[in-house]
Image (spheres, rainbow, N blue to C red):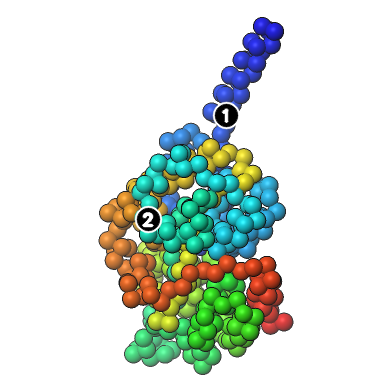
Amino acid sequence: MKKLIALGAVASVIAGAATAQEQTLNIYNWSDYIAEDTIAKFEAETGIKVVYDVYDSNEVLEAKMLTGNSGYDIVVPTSDFLQRQIAAGAYQKLDKSKLPNLANMDPDLMADAEVYDPGNEYAVIYMWGTTGLGYNVNAVAERLGEDYEVNSWELVFDPEISAKLADCGISMLDAPSEMIPAAMNYLGLDPRSTSKDDLEAGAALLETVRENVRYFHSSQYINDLANGDICVSVGWSGDVFQAMARAEEAENGVEIGYVIPDEGALQWFDMMAIPVDAPNPEAAHKFINFVMDAQITADITNYVWYANANKASMPLVDEEITSDPGIFPTDAASKGLWGSQVYDARTDRTVTRLWTRVKTGM
Ligand code: N2P
């Protein structure tokens, strides 16, 4: 008996040493979505080694979450996808006693996120933004005239206008649940509608401008806009601002603008969550709490140009960012924003089928 206890004690000491030395945290986040030093700082502070993978599509993340055994401890789905994945049992509830920095979060924005996650039980807002228009100021002016003001979705959805931009290159996100509603909204339909007719109408509009679109991709446009290889992108706010910053840094004379069109745009929240089968939920909580530190979140926003929901970080965010209506929309622009709408399985199949048709013409 005595011997057994002694052996057990030795075994647990060894196990304890092993976990302290070899703890890893597997993170799966969007590409171009974190400051350069965030991971290094977390590793230095906690001794936990981070393995960091990236994606640029909710569909890709969702396939992994619904299959299970992804091996990830932290993932960052967009609000509507989060809602569907919570319903499917993909996530574990947060242990809020391990997240004291929740006190830093903006209660109004967290309340907005409750639409998708009642009680904020499963997720915390990482960053948020809008899906609008990025454009090369000079290339567009050359083709549409110096007086043309970019403020409407007609830039991409009006076949005659987008035809004039086809030669300098239009890109669209490979994100069906964002692109089809944007087209529906332009047609005067409710972008949140799940009616088959409305979705068909949105897809049909996309098909009419398809020949003017160079590609559908959700991350390549950052560099392409910055280098002047394309001139218009339906893109995510911060990504377009990153393109702007890269062009400035390259001093290549490319000037990029981002606009939330007057007809309105999608506003989304990307949410940090812990998969139900995460290997290291303890470290996952540490990371979520670490990110909610005011300075850490401010550093991320200052690097990726996305708005965050951390009230305490705001004084630490560059004025250039907090005052930009493309990143923090004005109250007037906010009225025109719509929230992402979760699709039931049937609507999702319809949207997937329509999207294949839009992209391939079949
Ligand atoms: C970062 C893209 C995140 C926005 N590159 C997608 N919700």
Q: In the rendered structure, find residue 106 and report the number of the disc placed on it.
A: none
Q: How crowded is mark 1: few (under 14 residues within 10 Å), some or many (20 or more)?
A: few
Q: Which residue is label 2 attached to?
A: 107
Secondary structure category for the residue under label 2: helix
Please tell me which residue lies in front, 117 or 207. Answer: 117
Q: Where is residue 126 in the image (x, y as percent from the top left)?
A: 45, 55
User: Label 2: how many residues lie within 10 Å, few (<14), some (14-19) or many (20+)?
Assistant: some
Helix, strand, or loop for circle 1? helix
Closest to the camera, between mark 2 and mark 1, is 2
As drawn, the residue found furthest toward the bottom would be: 160
Question: Relative to 107, is 24 on the left or the right?
Answer: right
At a point 64% along the width and 52% down the height, the residue shown is 89
Q: Which residue is drawn at 51% across and 93% down?
A: 160
Identify which residue is drawn at 52% across, 87% down: 187
Q: Name the residue under label 1.
A: 19
Question: What is the spatial separation of the Cα atoms under label 2 and label 1, in whole angstroms?
Answer: 36 Å
